[in-house]
């Protein structure tokens, strides 16, 4: 029941191989291994002096990610769900390379990206693009759509000047916009249209992997559906792989092959989409699913998960969820549970799993 | 996959949306005072640029001056009857109108050149500090803090005392006294803009750091810089005038407005007000016009009013 280390490793190696629907067993496209990330500045000499003299408290370190493993197979859509502040956006930014992990490795088709020389990493990094949350802040307000879309391919020599107009028009059509809008500035578009432009910009460098960080959270519900359908259409047309980060279980359920649930810097459960919604194993997942609003006509009391997300400045010992868990017992307070496989492709980190 | 609704195509109506520049021009024109300021500024700058053709005489050419015409009140005719001194003459018989036009040329030129140089230096340093942060940022900003805690006239006077006089020296002194304003303004704008997602997107698209800095970050930091630069032109001109008034600025052979005021100062109490007052009025109008324009620019470029 204990002896967690080997069980954890075995489960993680199996999970990605079984996850794709078609059962292919190729190496994962992107693999994150034991990623840790802490935020907080290293103290400079003035602060160190202050601390030594007792005038200053040591700066608090935020533990955003605490040993996260995640691997994503080619063609797979992985949903990453968690409360705000649980570290899911940080994980997404590490996956695309915007943040460097404090420790841990990032493998892209089996090679360690951060060990590559700068130029090669930049080229390889083009394969991983991000769709951002804010459709307003994610487009440079001073550039016309034409320049927004064509700049990077021009810089990287994917197209030349003569092909530019055609290239931009094709991209705009691909995301469902009229090619005639190429001369406009971002402020002349609605939120949904801007989201489409942001997607077109990412597609311009021919990525294989898209990280969508709350990509539809800022949009109206009707527009959300359109953009989600666009994601699915692009997946079929271009064979894209997605890491879809969201706090919205409904959105994730609609899209994902596999869902990973995060709580306070750790992945607590990961399973194929249908499985996690029908047989959630971790108490936190159960709580999340129970509270998701539904359209069913029934009298229902919302039993919110007790308490609040603890501060990542001082995460609780043992299982991070134990202060809010209805099933917590002594061991949960002392020992952090590891991910264990409880069904094919279904891993969960809870001491109750073996019980 | 069913994509339910057709793509939200652009309606023809909003293809007529105003270009940003035209919208700024329209917003600027909403204030009559600002339009007056702009017109006044244009007149002054044109007069300064065209001084050799507009001025009745070349005030630096001693051959054209007649000592016998010294200290004539405004409106007097010259001794040889060839011209009328509209604003009077100074003690050397120099036509004040001509001297003011040539002085404006120097004041505006020095102010603009010093501002552009300080802007370029401060902008580059501030942009790098805001984008990269870290030790460079900390050191640079502490230097700026220290420098800004001294009055800029003191900084300029120290430098002039070290370097000596001359038009190039005074430009250096003005740049040294003012770069910190631009560095701070650019840094704060770069801090705000640099955290936005479009900068992250540019990094992910593999664009080079100089390209991100100058094509993506800098253009979005410009509005506050334009306002500061406009106000600082006025400050640079005033500072140069002050230094020249104190005799630290430009040499007597190239009198700027400040030196003209200083030259007439001793005659103020004897009733010959024009030698000092008219250059002073010219300086006042110049600075007033620049400030009127800068104030309106600040309103027009205010991101909170501008956003939608």
Image (cartoon, coloured by chain):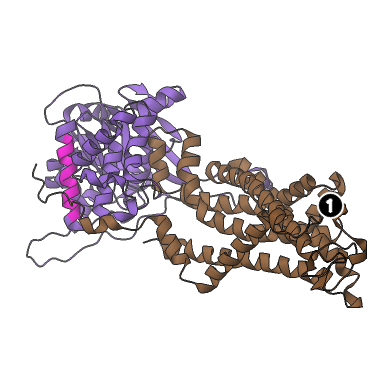
Chain colours: A purple, B brown
Around disc 1, counting alpha carbons within 10 Å, would you say few (fewer than 14), some (14 to 19), or many (20 or more)? few
Is residue B108 shown left or right of residue A115? right
Q: Is residue A34 above or below residue A54?
A: above
Q: What residue is shown at x 41% (from left), y 25% (from top)?
A: A121
* Magenta span contains residue A226: yes
Residue identifier under label 1: B61
Q: Quadrant of the N terminus of chain B?
A: top left
Relative image position of residue B87 (x, y in whole percent): 78, 70
Q: Which stretch did the figure color magenta?
A: A223-235
Question: Dot 1 falls on which chain?
Answer: B
Query: Which of A253/A303 is in front?
Result: A253
Query: Which of B171/B207 is in front?
Result: B171
| Viewer can see residue A347 | no
Relative image position of residue B57 (x, y in whole percent): 78, 58
| Viewer can see residue B164 | yes
Is residue B26 shown left or right of residue A210? right
Relative image position of residue A130 (x, y in whole percent): 32, 40
Predominant SS of the magenta segment: helix
Q: What residue is shown at x 51% (from left), y 55% (from top)?
A: B223
Relative image position of residue A97 (x, y in whole percent): 39, 34
Q: Residue furthest front?
A: B81
Q: What residue is shown at x 42% (from left), y 62% (from top)?
A: B306
């Amino acid at each position: 029941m204990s002896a967690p280390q080997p069980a954890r490793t075995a489960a993680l190696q199996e999970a990605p191989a079984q996850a794709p629907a078609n059962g292919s067993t190729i190496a994962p496209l992107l693999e994150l291994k034991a990623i840790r990330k802490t935020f907080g500045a290293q103290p400079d000499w003035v602060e160190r002096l202050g601390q030594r003299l007792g005038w200053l408290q040591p700066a608090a370190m935020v533990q955003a990610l605490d040993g996260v493993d995640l691997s994503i197979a080619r063609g797979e859509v992985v949903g990453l769900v968690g409360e705000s502040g649980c570290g899911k956006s940080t994980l997404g930014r590490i996956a695309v390379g915007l943040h460097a992990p404090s420790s841990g490795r990032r493998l892209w088709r089996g090679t360690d990206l951060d060990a590559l020389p700068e130029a090669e990493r930049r080229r390889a990094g083009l394969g991983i693009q991000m769709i951002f949350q804010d459709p307003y802040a994610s487009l440079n307000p001073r550039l016309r759509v034409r320049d927004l879309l064509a700049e990077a391919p021009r810089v990287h020599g994917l197209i030349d000047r003569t092909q530019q107009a055609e290239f931009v028009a094709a991209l705009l059509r691909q995301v469902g916009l009229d090619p005639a809008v190429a001369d406009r500035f971002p402020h002349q578009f609605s939120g949904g249209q801007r989201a489409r432009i942001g997607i077109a910009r990412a597609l311009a460098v021919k990525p294989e992997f898209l990280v969508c960080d709350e990509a539809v959270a800022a949009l109206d519900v009707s527009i959300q559906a359109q953009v989600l359908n666009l994601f699915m259409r692009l997946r079929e047309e271009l064979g894209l792989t997605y890491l879809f980060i969201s706090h919205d279980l409904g959105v994730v359920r609609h899209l994902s092959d596999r869902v990973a649930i995060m709580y306070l810097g750790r992945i607590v459960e990961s399973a194929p989409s249908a499985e996690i919604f029908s047989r959630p194993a971790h108490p936190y997942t159960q709580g999340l699913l129970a509270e998701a609003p539904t359209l069913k006509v029934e009298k229902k009391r919302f039993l919110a998960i007790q308490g609040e997300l603890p501060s990542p400045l001082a995460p609780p010992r043992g299982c991070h969820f134990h202060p809010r868990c209805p099933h917590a017992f002594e061991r949960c307070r002392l020992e952090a549970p590891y991910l264990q496989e409880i069904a094919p492709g279904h891993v969960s980190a809870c001491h109750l799993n073996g019980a | 996959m069913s994509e339910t609704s057709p793509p939200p195509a652009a309606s023809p109506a909003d293809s007529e949306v105003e270009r940003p520049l035209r919208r700024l021009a329209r917003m600027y024109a909403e204030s009559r005072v600002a339009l007056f300021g702009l017109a006044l500024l244009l007149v002054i700058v044109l007069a300064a640029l065209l001084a050799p053709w507009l001025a009745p005489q070349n005030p630096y050419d001693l051959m054209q001056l007649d000592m016998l015409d010294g200290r004539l009140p405004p409106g007097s005719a010259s001794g040889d009857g060839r011209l009328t001194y509209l604003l009077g003459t100074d003690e050397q018989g120099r036509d004040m109108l001509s001297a003011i036009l040539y002085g404006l040329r120097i004041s505006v030129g020095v102010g603009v050149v010093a501002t552009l140089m300080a802007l370029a230096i401060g902008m580059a340093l501030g942009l790098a500090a805001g984008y990269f942060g870290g030790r460079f940022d900390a050191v640079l900003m502490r230097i700026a803090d220290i420098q800004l805690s001294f009055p800029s006239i003191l900084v300029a006077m120290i430098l002039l005392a070290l370097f000596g006089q001359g038009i190039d020296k005074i430009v250096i002194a003005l740049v040294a006294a003012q770069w910190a304003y631009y560095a701070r303004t650019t840094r704060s704008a770069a801090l705000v803009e640099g955290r936005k997602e479009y900068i992250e997107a540019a990094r992910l698209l593999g664009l080079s750091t100089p390209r991100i800095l100058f094509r993506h970050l800098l253009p979005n930091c410009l509005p506050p810089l334009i306002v500061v630069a406009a106000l600082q032109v006025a400050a640079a001109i005033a500072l140069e005038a002050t230094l020249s008034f104190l005799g630290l600025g430009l040499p007597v052979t190239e009198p700027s407005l400040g030196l003209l005021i200083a030259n007439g100062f001793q005659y103020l109490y004897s009733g010959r007000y024009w030698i000092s007052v008219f250059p002073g009025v010219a300086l006042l109008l110049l600075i007033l016009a620049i400030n009127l324009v800068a104030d309106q620019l600040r309103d027009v470029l205010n991101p909170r009013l501008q956003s939608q």
